[in-house]
Structure formats: C-alpha cells, structure tokens
Amino acid sequence: MESVVPVASFFYWVGAGTVAYLALRISYYLFTAFRVWGLGNETGVGPGLGEWAVVTGSTDGIGKSYAQELAKRGMKVLLISRSQDKLNQVSSEIREKFKVETRTIAVDFGSEDIYDRIKTGLAGLEIGVLVNNVGMSYEYPEYFLDIPDLDNTIRKLININVVSVCKMTRLVLPGMVER
C-alpha cells in the first residue's frame, strides 16, 4: 500500500502542474484578446514609425479605409490612384476630418513607366507605412480562355497585382530600413 502513495502523489503534482499551465495560457490569451479588441492597439501604428503612410489604390473601398485609419492615427497620407479627381476628393475629406497633411500622385499601375514619377513624389518623405492595395481582376466572371484581349489582360494583371507590389516596396523599403 505504501508504494502506491508516492506514485499517486507524483500524478497529483503532474496534474496540478498541467492545470496551472493551462490556466495561465488561457488567461494570457484572454488578456491579449481584451487588450487588442477591447482597448485597441492604437500605439502600434502611427507617426512613431515615420510621418507618412503611402496607400496605393486609395480612392475606394479598402484602400480608402486604410488611408482614413492611418490619418486617424495621426499619420500624414500620400494617396496613389488613377483618377486625380477622386484623389482630390479623398484627400480633401481626410484633411478636413483628421487634420493631417495629404499628398496625391495620379498614376495607372497598368503602365510600366510610372515608377520614376512615384519615386519623385516620395522623395524626402519619412515613410513609416506602405499599403499596397492596388489590384484588379477581370471586368466580369468569365472562363480564362474566353476573356476578350487575353494577352493585354494578362499583362495588366501582372503589372497591377504583382509588379506594383515589388516596385513600390523597392521604392519605400530602403528608407524604412535605414531608420
């Protein structure tokens, strides 16, 4: 009978340790969830990363929302999109609502000769955030081989969805790494 007691005692402490470990892990996850979702994580993104945020595809949808959220956090915003009229409208809205400086660059990411112009527009800015949001798909659902002007569509898909991300990151990242 006495030899059973040390074994039972051992399993008791293994079980108690396991319960304590799991309780601490669950508490940590709950605290993290409360901190992020309840209190917000406002200090993570803001001017401390760099004064400026660059947002491509910034005149509609997700890109516009990103630009507004970054401005809300006190960052100056450089908006890049195709339509200068839409850029002016979004820029004006952000300046009035969030009282931050904005700049715009109107370019079509479907073209390949735009990056020198963008580089000139980015010169001298302390960029802390880059949001590569520009993108495209087909105009309407269609079988791939039935897309009108397929070669041109493929070229535009690659330029807008792939090349733009690489080129914009290439323009912005060196300054971020340097800081």
Image (cartoon, rainbow, N blue to C red):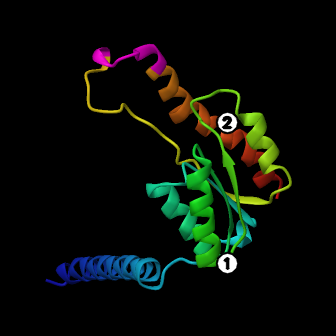
Residues at discs 1 and 2 in contact (Cβ within 8 Å): no
Residue 38 against residue 121 in the figure, above or below: below
* Residue closest to the eye, 37 or 66: 66
Q: How dense is the environment of label 1, judged by Cα within 10 Å: few (below 14), some, or many (20 and up)?
A: some
Residue 64 against residue 108 in the figure, above or below: below
- What residue is shown at x 29% (from left), y 83% (from top)? 16
Query: Residue 93's quadrant in the figure?
Result: bottom right
Query: Residue 167's quadrant in the figure?
Result: top right
Q: Quadrant of the N terminus?
A: bottom left
Residue 36 picture location, percent across and down: 46, 77
Q: Quadrant of the C terminus?
A: bottom right
Q: What amino acid is found at the position of numbered circle 1 in the picture?
A: Lys
Is residue 3 rendered magenta in the image?
no
| The residue stretch that appears in magenta | 145-152
Q: Which mark is residue 167?
A: 2
Main secondary structure of the magenta stretch: helix
- What residue is shown at x 84% (from left), y 49% (from top)? 123
* 109 horizontally vs 33: left or right: right
Residue 146 picture location, percent across and down: 28, 16
Residue annotated with mark 1: 99
Q: Is residue 144 visible?
A: yes
* 11 horizontally vs 17: left or right: left
* Residue closest to the eye, 87 or 166: 87
* 42 horizontally vs 18: left or right: right
| Residue at disc 1, secondary structure | loop
Q: Is residue 44 visible?
A: no
- What residue is shown at x 53% (from left), y 44% (from top)? 134
